[in-house]
Amino acid sequence: MKETPYMDTMTQHSMEHDYSALMSLALDGMLSADEASNLDQHLLACTACQASWNKWQRIAHVLTVEPFAGPPQGFALRLDHAMVRDEQRHERMLAGLVLAGGTTLVLALIVLGTALTTALWMAIAPPARVQLVETLGFAGQFAALVFQNLASIRDGVAALLPDPVIMLVVCLALMVISAVWVRLVFFGARAASGER
């Protein structure tokens, strides 16, 4: 960086006599009477130090007297509400994850327990294998019967239903109604938690 003649003059001046420490102490009100008198006498004789002293006093006035701009009114309250809402959202997400994980774990334990119990039962009582095969056969026949009835119900409903375009409109209307209902439930819960 190229130094200007003004900077050279200021640097040379400050090297000849340095009163900046005394000026700083004077602004803080920490000068003794002798030091204050010495500074006053120097300022009367030195125009460069007078200019520096005037600048220092203006800066000190701005920093100590002028009010600082604060946040707008209600900012802290809005920030607090936003943080509470964010924390509640995180708690709901965590609760949902815990519920889903717990449900999955319980179902896995039920399936595993059923499989182990069946394996143990078959190992202890070999004639039970025949009974298990018969039970599984009946369960398969029951499932086939249910699927046949579901197919019959589907075909019957399809025969009774109007044009597919009307069905599409009805499905879209049901989806919109469901979305509105979910929105009302969530906003109602938020409004109720906000009133507390």
Image (cartoon, grey):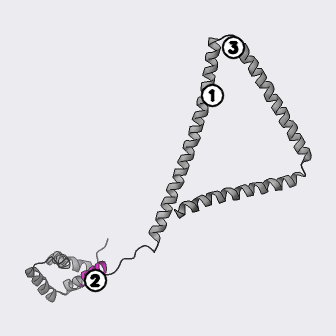
Furthest-top residue in view? Answer: 126
Query: What amino acid is at disc 3?
Result: Ala
Can residue 5 be seen here? The reply is no
**Distance between mark 3 and mark 2 Cα atoms:** 100 Å
Q: Looking at the rendering, in which quadrant would you find the N terminus?
A: bottom left
For residue 58, the mark is 2
Q: In which image quadrant can residue 33 be found?
A: bottom left
Report crowding for label 2: few under 14, some 14 to 19, many 20 or more residues within 10 A (C-alpha). Answer: few
How crowded pointer 1 is (Cα within 10 Å; few <14, some 14-19, many 20+) is rated as: few
Residue at x-position 10% and y-position 78%:
32
Residue 128 bears which disc, if any?
Answer: 3
- Residue extending farthest to the right is 159
**Residue 169, position in %: x, y?**
83, 56
- Determine whether the residue tagged by mark 2 lies in a helix, strand or loop: helix
Q: Earlier in the sequence, mark 3 or mark 1?
A: 1
Asked if residue 51 lies left or right of residue 33, the reply is: right
Q: Tag 2 or tag 3, which sits nearer the N-term?
A: 2
Say which quarter of the image contains residue 195. bottom right
Which residue is found at the position 12% from the left and 82% from the top? 36
Q: Which residues are magenta?
A: 54-72
